Image: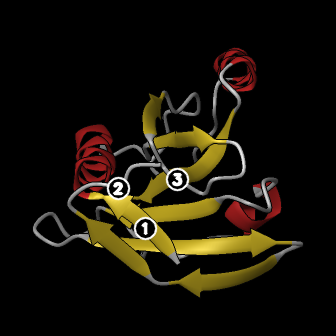
């Protein structure tokens, strides 16, 4: 199950809506081994596409170095789908390389509806998980 605070949930949804009609993407980092989504990091979709997202390789390398320096890991890897449901595509599944991460998808196909779903993707197997939004994460 993914536990996410309201502020981070709102920030992911706002980023998805702001970048529409292109897909939005980003990471929420947290202390290594904690499964605590604490630091929201919106990224630029280098593909600038309504049907595909891609992290800029330089930005992604810098992010992983920064997370390493801070003893963090990607707890959530998120992106949006602009015209389809919030379910991983074949491409999304093939690119999923963080078995410990929650893969969050937000669909922006309906402007007045929030479709926010989370998955675990391990070795090509997609498992949807419950999402619990809390006012704030409990102190570590």
Task: Check the image and report above or below for 39 versus 7.
Answer: above
Mark closer to the chain start, 3 or 2: 3
Residue that badge 2 annotates: 137
Give the label, 1 or 2, closer to the camera: 2
For the residues bearing labels 1 and 2, Cβ distance under 8 angstroms = yes
Q: Is residue 77 left or right of residue 58?
A: left
What kind of element bears circle 2?
A: loop
* Residue farthest to the left, as pictured: 112
- What separation in Å lies between label 1 and label 2 (alpha carbons)? 8 Å
Which corner quadrant of the image does residue 90 belong to? bottom right
Residue count near mark 1 (Cα–Cα under 10 Å), binned few <14, some 14–19, many ≥20: some
Residue at left 52%, top 33%?
45
> Is residue 13 left or right of 39 when viewed as pictured?
left
Q: Does the rendering let one see residue 118?
A: yes
Q: Which residue is mark 1?
A: 3
Pointer 3 residue: 36
CB atoms of marks 3 and 2 within 8 Å: yes
């Amino acid at each position: 199950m993914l536990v996410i605070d309201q502020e981070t949930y709102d920030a992911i949804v706002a980023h998805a809506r702001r970048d529409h009609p292109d897909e939005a993407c980003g990471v929420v980092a947290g202390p290594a081994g904690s499964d605590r989504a604490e630091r929201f990091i919106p990224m630029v979709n280098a593909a600038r596409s309504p049907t595909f997202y891609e992290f800029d390789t330089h930005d992604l390398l810098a992010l992983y170095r920064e997370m390493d320096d801070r003893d963090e890991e990607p707890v959530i890897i998120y992106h949006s789908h602009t015209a389809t449901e919030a379910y991983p595509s074949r491409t999304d599944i093939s690119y999923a390389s963080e078995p410990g991460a929650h893969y969050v998808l937000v669909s922006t196909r309906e402007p007045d509806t929030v479709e926010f779903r989370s998955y675990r993707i391990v070795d090509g197997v997609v498992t949807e998980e419950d999402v619990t939004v809390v006012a704030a994460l409990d102190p570590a």
